[in-house]
């Protein structure tokens, strides 16, 4: 399945605010259900067939979608896992001059997109290990 990220809306046919039953109708049964952190109230789900995780917030709506290779994830028609960490950084910086660049991650609050890039310092030609699309407020502290 192809997932074109729509900033602060979703990716592909998945959209933020969907209920778990809607996700299940679209993707089938989750291959795994888990609590990302011990204090989570709602379980997250993994869909191995699509190489993604779905994160929920109360009362059970999608708040973020995290992809891992070889998921087909696109932004502005560019396949993100085919880009090196450096190419991804340049693309996101072009779209968001305020891109947050950390040693192991990239986060665009303007676009609602982040990338986990733990090996970028050693080898910037490697792709990101994961890409996350998130709704407004996902990273805000409560």
Image (spheres, rainbow, N blue to C red):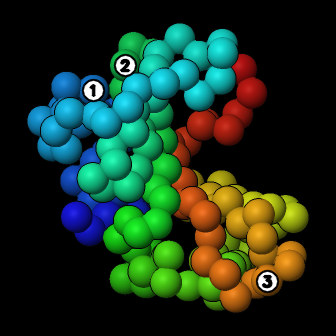
Q: Mark 1 points at which residue?
A: 20
Q: Name the residue under label 2.
A: 60
Q: Badge 1: how crowded within 10 Å, few (<14), some, or many (20+)?
A: some
Image coords of residue 137 (percent x, y): 61, 36
Which residue does the image show at 39% across and 39% down from the upper left?
46
Q: Distance between the residues labelled 1 and 3?
A: 38 Å
Say if 142 sits above or below 49 in the image.
above
140 with respect to 57 (left or right): right
Quadrant of the drawing holding the C terminus: top right
Q: Are marks 1 and 3 in contact (CB under 8 Å)?
A: no
Q: Distance between the residues labelled 1 and 2?
A: 7 Å
Q: Mark 3 points at which residue?
A: 123
Image coords of residue 44 (percent x, y): 45, 28
Say if 83 sits above or below 65 in the image.
below
Mark on residue 44? none
48 with respect to 80 (left or right): left
């Amino acid at each position: 399945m192809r997932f074109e990220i729509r900033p602060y809306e979703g990716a592909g046919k998945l959209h933020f605010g969907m209920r778990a039953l809607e996700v299940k109708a679209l993707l089938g049964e989750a291959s795994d259900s888990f609590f990302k952190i011990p204090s989570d109230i709602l379980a997250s789900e993994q869909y191995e067939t699509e190489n993604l995780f779905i994160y929920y917030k109360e009362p059970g709506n999608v708040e973020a979608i995290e992809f891992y290779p070889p998921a087909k994830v696109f932004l502005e028609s560019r396949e993100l896992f085919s880009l090196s960490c450096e190419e991804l950084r340049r693309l996101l910086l072009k779209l968001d001059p305020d891109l947050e660049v950390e040693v192991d991650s990239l986060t665009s609050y303007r676009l609602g997109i982040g990338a986990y890039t733990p090996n970028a310092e050693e080898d910037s030609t490697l792709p990101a290990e994961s890409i996350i699309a998130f709704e407004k407020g996902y990273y805000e502290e409560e």
